[in-house]
Image (spheres, helix red, strand yellow):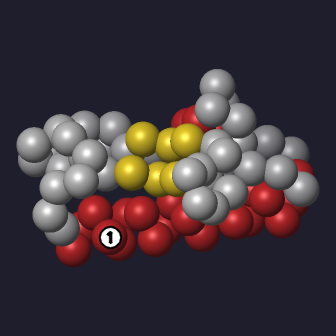
Amino acid sequence: QNVAKIEIGKLVQALDTFYSTYDRYPTNDEGITILAAKTDEFPDGLISFVPDDPWGNPYEYRCPGLEEPFDLICLGADKREGGS
């Protein structure tokens, strides 16, 4: 769980940098994979690669989020929302 929290923190930081640069968050179609894309502004990407969660599943990104501008979700070992 600690690894997932650290990775989510890094992804959130990259999403906030994306927002600061482009005045928007990535679309659902772009997803968080766009954070690793090489651009003129970020020749190495905002992150070097998009990690899977510690259980081997992709992090889920939704924009807009339910209560925030975006949701970044780790489903965990049971691969379901709402776990502990």
Residue 6, compared with residue 11, is above or below; it is below
Q: Position of residue 73 (x, y in %)?
A: 39, 51
The residue positioned farthest toward the left in the image shown: 78
Q: Give the image quarter of residue 46.
A: bottom right
Name which residue type carries label 1: Lys
The residue positioned farthest toward the front in the image shown: 67
Residue 9, compared with residue 64, is above or below; it is below
Residue at (66%, 46%) from the top-left corner? Answer: 64
Residue 9 visible in rendering: yes
Q: Quadrant of the N terminus?
A: bottom left
- In the image, taking residue 8 as reference, residue 47 lies left or right, namely right
Closest to the observer: 76 or 2? 76
Q: Give the image quarter of residue 37.
A: top right
Closest to the observer: 67 or 27? 67
Q: Quadrant of the C terminus?
A: bottom left
- In the image, taking residue 26 as reference, residue 61 lies left or right, namely left
Residue at (42%, 41%) from the top-left corner? Answer: 60
Q: Position of residue 17 (x, y in %)?
A: 73, 65
Residue 51 visible in rendering: no
Closest to the observer: 49 or 19? 19
Disc 1 on helix, strand or loop?
A: helix
Residue at (26%, 46%) from the top-left corner? Answer: 81
Q: Position of residue 35 (x, y in %)?
A: 62, 47
Q: Residues within 10 Å of mark 1 (few under 14, many from 20)?
A: few
Residue at (83%, 51%) from the top-left corner? Answer: 24
Residue 45, compared with residue 2, is above or below; it is above
The residue positioned farthest toward the top in the image shown: 29
Q: Mark 1 = which residue?
A: 5
- In the image, taking residue 70 as reference, residue 9 lies left or right, namely left
- In the image, taking residue 63 as reference, residue 73 lies left or right, namely left
Q: Position of residue 62 (x, y in %)?
A: 55, 42
